Amino acid sequence: MENTLVMKFVDSELKKFSMSLTDIKDDLTSVEIETLMDAIIANQEAFELKNVLVSKDSANIVGKTVTEVYKA
């Protein structure tokens, strides 16, 4: 199963901004995710963002199962 971490933040215009990470480890904890989100807010100048991120909103791990049925 492929897992993607989808993190949502609130920006300075009170709009939600999403950031996703693919190929995350299977045992990622909520503490690790919150720490990552805090680090993103603290170091957001490393990203090309339209608006300043002001707070965390939510985080979800989305799982996707891929079944290969043909490969040349």
Image: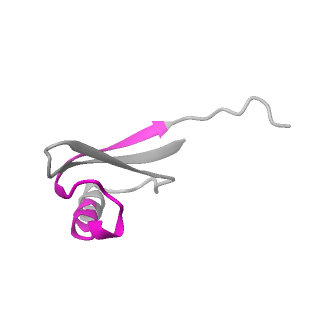
Q: Of 5 and 9, which appears nearest the observer?
A: 9
Magenta-drawn segment: 37-63
Question: Within the image, what quadrant is residue 62 found in?
Answer: top left
Q: Single out the residue that lies furthest toward the front.
A: 50
Q: Residue at x 23, y 63 (%)?
A: 41
Left or right: where 12 falls relative to 69: left
Percent coordinates x, y for residue 29 in the rendering? 31, 56
- Would you say 48 lies left or right of 25 here? left
Residue placed most toward the observer, 28 or 71: 71
Q: Is residue 42 left or right of residue 25?
A: left
Residue 11 on the magenta segment: no
Q: Position of residue 6 (x, y in %)?
A: 36, 46
Residue farthest along the right direction in this orientation: 72
Q: Position of residue 28 (x, y in %)?
A: 37, 56
User: Quarter of the image containing the C terminus?
Assistant: top right
Q: Where residue 65 appears, x then y in whole percent?
A: 55, 35
